[in-house]
Amino acid sequence: MNERDSEIMGQMLCNADYSPTEDIHQADVIVINTCSIREKAEQKVYSLLGRLKKLKQKKPDLIISVAGCVAQQEGERLQARMPLVDIVLGPQQIYCLPELVSRAAQKGKPLMAVDLSPSFEIPRYIPPSPAISRQKDDRIASTLYFKKFVTIMQGCNNFCTYCVVPYTRGRETSRKPDDILAEIEALAEQGVKEITLLGQNVNSYGKYPADSRNYKSFPELLRKVAALENIKRIRFTTSHPKDLSPELIACFADVAKLCPHFHLPVQSGSNPVLKRMNRGYTVEEYLAKVDTLRQVKPDIALTTDIIVGFPGETDKDFQATMDLLETVRYHGAFSFKYSDRPQAKAVAFDNKVAEEVKSERLSCLQQKQNEISLQKNRGYEGSIQHIMVEGQSKNGDGQWSGRTMSNIIVNFEGPAALSAGQEVQVRITEGLLHSLRGVLSL
Ligand code: 5AD
Ligand code: SF4
């Protein structure tokens, strides 16, 4: 979501006659897009701003903007603590960036745009600028012009008790289906082949705003995107287990372009913890959905998010999460130590878990998940996978890199004549912890 927001801000600045630079010393405007989902992400912003102080002293006209969730959450406090910041821009306000930059350039006061409107509408289509409309991947030499994110909804009404998002991104709002399809069609015309539909909770697409009754449902939207000839692969993220409908599961059976990967954050394997998190499902309900997904699409790769050390999490609760890992056997899991977030309800919960206990649980869980991920990846050995080429590895060893339909990175040997975006068959020779190795299969 943030990556797409950064891209949108880049596109708008390009349209306002700025051009991107790789050299920070050349920059006239620096926009730091921020995330405050966990404490660690927030700390990074302050340390980066600290490093920019010297640059601003040397170049007083430099405009520094902090955008995103930290900006929303900190507002004036951010400028008070870091006077070098010229513009503070909440996630709903990113579309005002060019106007604020031009005001700041005319030596306006520090500018603040952190309103959260309950009737916020994602603006209509922003034309991608060729200069910026590429994604970068540090592993590979080329830029990924053929795969793009498209925002379909934003904000969240779920109020999980640990989470800051409803307070920083505001109420859930879906983008108009025609706007979404127009953007994807334009991307397809430019050669984009893979689309990831983005939102805090994509499978509740179409529920809000109140006048969205004639919007399509998420499964209907998926089918519309799949009907676009030049789009070859479709992904989406993120989904809330409670909103995962039979209609969406059915799409995996008959929408061939829908990639067999589902990121389904479970957060905990203990019902009492899930209840205190306000997740709206039980472990049993979650597992039943996992079973149905696997019945419909046996080779689907499941990934998840897990929080350890939520307030009141006992050894027994944690063991239940460990058991869940064994039961589901995810391809991968992002796991985090619980941290208090401003405004989130769990800040006031009793029985906070000690930092050492959280660390211990996290490493225990990650060790278990690593074993499972490695076994899952070894399970691909000997198979032929349909890969979309992403580019040649940077270290000049003639290796190519791409992804399986199930979103696993594959490094493989292939001739120099391949190109990014090309679809090839690769025979997998080795499964590693985070990737696969293979050779081009003719
Ligand atoms: N502490 C730790 N992890 C959190 N996440 C969200 N809020 C917190 C928090 N306060 C994790 C959840 C979510 C992922 C994006 O970040 O697992 O799914
Ligand atoms: Fe946060 Fe829960 Fe909303 Fe996800 S569903 S963004 S975890 S409040």
Image: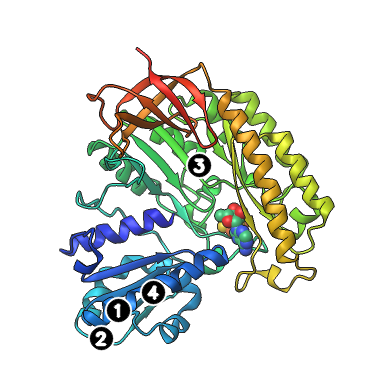
Q: Residue at x 23, y 76 (%)?
A: 62
The alpha-carbon separation of the residues under discs 3 and 2 comes to 43 Å
Kind of residue indicated by mark 3: Phe
Circle nearer the N terminus (3, 1): 1
Work out whether mark 1 precedes mark 4 in sequence or the reverse, and give the earlier one.
4
Q: Nearer the viewer, residue 33 or 173?
A: 33
The amino acid at mark 4 is Leu
Mark 4 crowd level (few <14, some 14–19, many ≥20, 10 Å Cα): some
Q: Earlier in the sequence, mark 3 or mark 2?
A: 2
Label 3 vs label 2, nearer the camera? 2
State the residue position of label 1: 54
Give the number of the mark in front: 2 or 1. 1
Viewer-nearest of discs 1 and 4: 1
Which label's residue is closer to the chain start, 4 or 2?
A: 4
Residue 108 horizontal side relative to residue 150, left or right: left
Q: Nearer the viewer, mark 4 or mark 3?
A: 4
In the structure shown, which secondary structural element does the residue marked by tag 2 occupy? Answer: loop
User: What residue is shown with label 3?
Assistant: 218
Indicate which label's residue lies in the foreground, 3 or 1.
1
Q: Where does the image place residue 430, in percent across and percent down from the top left? A: 50, 24
Distance between the Cα atoms at labels 4 and 2?
A: 20 Å
Upstream in the sequence, badge 4 or badge 3?
A: 4
Q: Quadrant of the N terminus?
A: bottom left
Q: Amino acid at mark 2?
A: Gly
Q: Position of residue 183 (x, y in %)?
A: 31, 46
Q: Residues within 10 Å of mark 3 (few under 14, many from 20)?
A: many
> Tag on residue 49?
4
Residue that numbered label 2 is attached to: 108
